[in-house]
């Protein structure tokens, strides 16, 4: 892959009337590459040629990426919860591992990735007890700079300023992605031997990474959801949401896993 400035210089020489062989000789770029830059073979779904977009972080050529703050915030939370990036020989793969008993959630994650990377194929692979939703792109490490060697809870997870701005603009979407991967909703029941036993809905989010838990707590604070957090002896953090008004807000904006 050639730097953007090399391509820009090649296009200037092409505009000046030089042929592919001469541009190739001057820049040391293969003639086939110059031909592709002169007459792009890639095209959108309507069949009309267009210029490639650039990745907003590395500025290299990229397929279309379309992110609203809500879509990015939810996809980021989904990656931090059940996602993993892995390098292949020529590209990278994002794999989201989801419980097979939640078909609606699986479909919504597939649609979410499809909206964000509309020109990349999204694959669904059934495994024993789980489903992997995956996509390939060279620019996944640009979109998720928290990627690194080792487990997420064993390395710092710190958002870059542009990520923090997007999450701050759509905190409910980030909370939804967290709950749908590492969270749940359940019914709390009081002691049946009490004079007036009762039951109520609660939410819980758990993760081994204190950094990820802090991001979840920050998003909850931003929307006024009351939380209680604690860490067990094994180092797993648990965040409970059970106040009536907070649960009602969670039910409205996050919903239930189905």
Image (cartoon, rainbow, N blue to C red):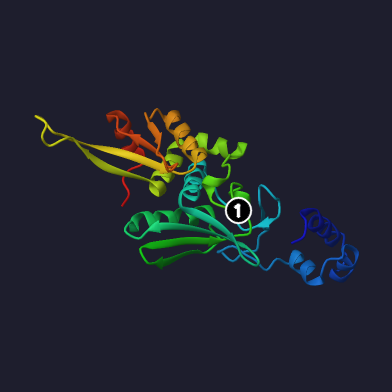
Q: Residue at x 75, y 64 (%)?
A: 37
Disc 1 designates what residue?
A: 149
Q: Pinpoint residue 131: horizontal percent, then vertical percent.
A: 40, 62
Q: Is residue 17 above or below residue 179?
A: below
Residue 113 in the figure: left or right of residue 37? left
Q: Position of residue 128 (x, y in %)?
A: 37, 67
* Numbered disc 1: secondary structure: loop
Residue 13 image position (x, y, % from top left) = 86, 60
Q: Quadrant of residue 44?
A: bottom right
Q: Choose between 140 and 71: the one closer to the eye.
A: 140
Q: Position of residue 135 (x, y in %)?
A: 53, 61
Report which quarter residue 163 is drawn in. top right
- Inspect this view and state whether residue 22 appears: yes
Q: Residue furthest front?
A: 233
Residue drawn at x 47%, y 32% as measured from the top left: 218
Q: Is residue 170 shown to the viewer in this render?
A: no
């Amino acid at each position: 892959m050639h730097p953007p400035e090399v391509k820009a210089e090649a296009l200037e020489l092409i505009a000046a009337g030089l042929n592919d062989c001469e541009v190739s000789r001057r820049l040391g770029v293969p003639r086939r590459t110059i031909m592709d830059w002169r007459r792009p073979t890639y095209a959108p779904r309507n069949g009309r040629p267009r210029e490639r977009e650039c990745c907003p972080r590395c500025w290299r050529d990229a397929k279309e990426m379309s992110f609203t703050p809500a879509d990015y915030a939810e996809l980021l939370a989904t990656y931090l919860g059940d996602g993993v990036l892995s390098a292949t020989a020529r590209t990278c793969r994002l794999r989201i591992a989801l419980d097979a008993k939640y078909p609606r959630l699986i479909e919504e994650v597939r649609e979410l990735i499809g909206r964000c990377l509309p020109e990349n194929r999204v694959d669904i692979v059934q495994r024993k007890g789980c489903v992997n939703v995956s996509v390939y792109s060279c620019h996944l490490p640009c979109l998720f700079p928290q990627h690194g060697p080792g487990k997420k809870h064993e390395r710092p997870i710190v958002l870059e300023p542009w990520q923090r701005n997007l999450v701050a603009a759509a905190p409910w979407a980030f909370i939804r992605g967290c709950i749908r991967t590492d969270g749940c909703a359940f019914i709390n029941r009081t002691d049946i031997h009490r004079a007036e036993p009762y039951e109520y809905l609660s939410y819980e989010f758990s993760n081994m990474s204190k950094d990820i838990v802090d991001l979840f707590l920050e998003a909850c604070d931003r929307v006024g959801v009351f939380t209680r957090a604690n860490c067990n002896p094994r180092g797993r953090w648990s965040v409970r949401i059970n106040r009536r008004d907070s649960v009602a807000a969670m039910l409205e904006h996050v919903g239930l896993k189905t």
